[in-house]
Image (spheres, rainbow, N blue to C red):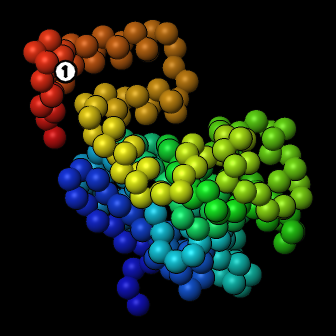
């Protein structure tokens, strides 16, 4: 059996594909091991954008319940996956063309941008099997207000892409996920690599005014900043160092 997660690097974009369709890309220990290895490859390859996508009809069904019911409850690798999606320097785009359930929503919500097909559905199904969406609440509450989460959290009801957009769970709903992701990727690649990474940090972390001032001044005086300003003045595309 091959890896349950594959990665391909091309022109600064790392595409990480969940590839365990037989169990709807459930979050087994092996899938998570392979996910971390794929993200290692993306980081070592200095990817400027990471696209997280999937094979099969589901993006991710959540925890591997068969594995969980027979083994000890250890979520360390899943917690680490959520944290790494937020801290890896490159922006991460979730490209979602299939249903997402339970823990899969946490993986999806940990990405910086979430592009979903207009036809897909979502559900926090944890309460219906006697557990709670505990770990995934961290990234999801960063996106959504609790009052809009109350009904789907407490009932486990299925909801559609339009509602997911309304509550802030996703950033883009489209009839063509690949095209939307390509356009977002193109836009990110126009920016300076260090500037984009720093901007991701601004979105993710609360910082003091002194920290923000220091960051701004360091970027304006950096080689990348000087190149960007020179390119603007000379009306040419910037030549970013890779």
- Residue in the foreground of this view, choosing between 221 and 166: 166
Q: Position of residue 96 (x, y in %)?
A: 53, 60
Q: Position of residue 66 (x, y in %)?
A: 69, 84
**Residue at image coords 33%, 38%:** 188
Near mark 1 (Cα within 10 A), the count class, few <14, some 14-19 or many ≥20, is many
Secondary structure category for the residue under label 1: helix
Can residue 30 be spotted in the picture? no
Q: Is residue 118 left or right of residue 236?
A: right
Q: Residue furthest bottom?
A: 1
**Residue at image coords 19%, 21%:** 228
Can residue 117 be spotted in the picture? yes
Q: Position of residue 63 (x, y in %)?
A: 66, 71
**Residue 151 to residue 28: above or below:** above
**Residue 232 to residue 202: above or below:** above
**Residue at image coords 42%, 58%:** 178
**Residue 220 to residue 143: above or below:** above
Q: Is residue 83 left or right of residue 36?
A: right
Q: Which residue is mark 1?
A: 228
Asked where in the image residue 5 lies, by quadrant, the reply is bottom left
Q: Residue furthest front?
A: 175
- Residue in the foreground of this view, choosing between 127 and 72: 127
Asked where in the image residue 15 lies, by quadrant, the reply is bottom left
Asked where in the image residue 48 lies, by quadrant, the reply is top left
Q: Is residue 88 left or right of residue 237?
A: right
The quarter of the picture where the N terminus appears is bottom left
**Residue at image coords 83%, 53%:** 152
């Amino acid at each position: 059996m091959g890896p349950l997660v594959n990665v391909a690097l091309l022109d600064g974009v790392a595409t990480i594909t969940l590839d365990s369709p037989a169990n709807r890309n459930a979050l087994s220990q092996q899938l998570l091991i392979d996910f971390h290895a794929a993200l290692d490859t993306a980081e070592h390859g200095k990817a400027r954008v990471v696209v997280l996508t999937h094979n099969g009809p589901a993006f991710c069904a959540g925890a591997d319940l068969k594995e969980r019911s027979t083994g000890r409850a250890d979520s360390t690798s899943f917690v680490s996956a959520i944290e790494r999606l937020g801290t890896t320097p490159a922006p991460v785009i979730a490209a979602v063309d299939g249903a997402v359930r339970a823990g899969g929503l946490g993986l999806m919500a940990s990405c910086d941008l979430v592009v979903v097909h207009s036809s897909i559905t979502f559900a926090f199904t944890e309460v219906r099997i006697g557990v709670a969406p505990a770990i995934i609440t961290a990234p999801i509450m960063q996106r959504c207000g609790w009052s809009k989460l109350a009904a789907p959290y407490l009932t486990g009801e299925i909801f559609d892409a339009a509602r997911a957009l309304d509550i802030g769970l996703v950033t883009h709903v489209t009839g063509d996920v690949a095209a939307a992701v390509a356009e977002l990727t193109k836009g990110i690649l126009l920016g300076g690599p260090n500037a984009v990474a720093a901007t991701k940090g601004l979105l993710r972390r609360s910082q003091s005014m002194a920290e923000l001032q220091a960051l701004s001044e360091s970027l304006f005086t950096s080689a990348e900043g000087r190149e960007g300003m020179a390119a603007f003045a000379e009306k040419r595309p910037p030549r970013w160092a890779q």
